[in-house]
Image (cartoon, rainbow, N blue to C red):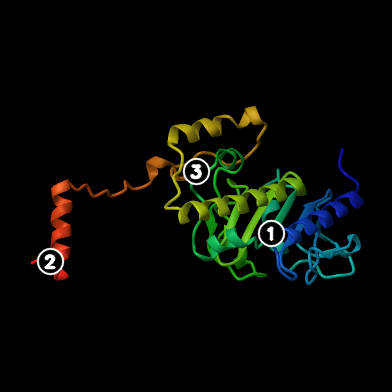
């Protein structure tokens, strides 16, 4: 049974507070929406801090982005939400944020495409990177079009990330997973390099989705996610004891320590 409209309004306000408390947005950044019946969309307004929203701040618009109800202006990025809804009938909520580490990867031109964590492989597969598009214009979604049908979260170059799902809480959890994966990937690289799982283990994880009750459009594609076999072999230099002694002798002679 669908939730009453007032409960959906409270859900958006509650998630907005969580997004703000987690530091995924600054000032008035980010936007959240829920698909209603009758071709209507409930969405956040523009120019309002997501941690300070009230239920009567929210806007209802149609599937063309025209405001039907509300005292404020709807988010300027409504076209991104509408594009996702039109391409994904299974999606009923969209959340866009600028979570710092995931956005750092997006600003560096890096996707989150390595098979590092079992729960991420099961839940999201991986998180691709869409090309940059000017916020608030149709160009914002152009780079996302190839990824929307088969991924549930996308990094947006030099902008942030978007996640979507059956309801606003699932969209929130997927965004949480994106930021968690970004943090783990960053730490792994700082510690000498992330080491993805082998292909056979990744395939097992995809096959286990039914057991965990996970529904996702994401399948296992070549290089998405990247497995251990997809990485180039590391170059290792092997030295004998005699080689090492010779190198040290040459270095000492160069410094005038040995003659």
Which mark is on residue 4? none
Residues at circles 3 and 2 in contact by the CB criterion of under 8 Å = no
Q: Nearer the viewer, residue 257 or 30?
A: 257
Q: Quadrant of the N terminus?
A: top right
- Label 3 or label 2, whichever lies nearer to me, is 2
Q: Mark 3 points at which residue?
A: 115
Q: Residues within 10 Å of mark 3 (few under 14, many from 20)?
A: many
Q: x, y percentage for residue 129?
A: 53, 57
- Label 2 or label 1, whichever lies nearer to me, is 2
Q: How crowded is mark 2: few (under 14 residues within 10 Å), some or many (20 or more)?
A: few
Q: Quadrant of residue 24?
A: bottom right
Q: Which of 5 and 39 is in front in this view?
A: 5
Q: Quadrant of residue 62?
A: bottom right
Q: Is residue 132 left or right of residue 13?
A: left
Question: In the rendered view, would you say 112 is above or below 44?
Answer: above
Report how far apart the C-alphas of labels 2 and 1 lie in the structure: 61 Å
Q: Is residue 172 left or right of residue 238?
A: right
| Secondary element type, mark 3 | loop
Q: Nearer the viewer, residue 167 or 188?
A: 188
Query: Mark 1 vs mark 3: which is more N-terminal?
Result: 1
Residue located 54% across and 39% down the image: 219
| Secondary element type, mark 2 | helix
Report how far apart the C-alphas of labels 3 and 2 lie in the structure: 48 Å
Q: x, y percentage for residue 167?
A: 76, 46
- Label 1 or label 3, whichever lies nearer to me, is 3
Query: Mark 3 vs mark 2: which is more N-terminal?
Result: 3
Q: x, y percentage for residue 108?
A: 50, 64
Query: Mark 2 vs mark 1: which is more N-terminal?
Result: 1
Q: Mark 2 points at which residue?
A: 253
Q: Name the residue under label 1.
A: 96
């Amino acid at each position: 049974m669908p939730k009453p409209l007032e409960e959906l309004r409270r859900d958006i306000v509650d998630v907005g507070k969580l997004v703000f408390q987690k530091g995924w947005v600054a000032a008035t950044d980010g936007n959240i929406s829920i698909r209603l019946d009758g071709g209507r969309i409930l969405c956040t307004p523009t120019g309002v801090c997501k941690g300070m929203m009230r239920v009567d701040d929210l806007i209802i618009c149609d599937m063309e982005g025209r405001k039907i109800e509300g005292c404020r202006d709807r988010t300027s990025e409504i076209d991104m939400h509408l594009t996702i809804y039109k391409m994904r009938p299974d999606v009923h909520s969209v959340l866009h944020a600028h979570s710092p580490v995931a956005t750092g990867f997006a600003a560096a031109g890096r996707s989150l495409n390595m098979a590092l964590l079992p729960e991420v492989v099961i839940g999201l597969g991986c998180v691709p990177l869409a090309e940059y598009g000017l916020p608030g214009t149709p160009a914002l979604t152009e780079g996302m079009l190839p990824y929307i049908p088969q991924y549930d979260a996308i990094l947006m170059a030099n902008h942030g990330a978007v996640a979507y799902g059956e309801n606003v809480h699932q969209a929130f959890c997927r965004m949480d997973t994106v930021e968690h994966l970004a943090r783990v990937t960053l730490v792994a690289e700082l510690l000498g390099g992330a080491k993805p799982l082998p292909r056979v283990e990744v395939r097992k994880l995809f096959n286990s989705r039914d057991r965990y009750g996970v529904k996702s459009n994401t399948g296992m594609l070549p290089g998405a996610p990247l497995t251990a076999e997809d990485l180039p072999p590391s170059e290792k230099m092997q030295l004998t004891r005699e080689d090492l002694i010779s190198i040290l002798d040459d270095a000492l002679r160069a410094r005038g320590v040995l003659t």
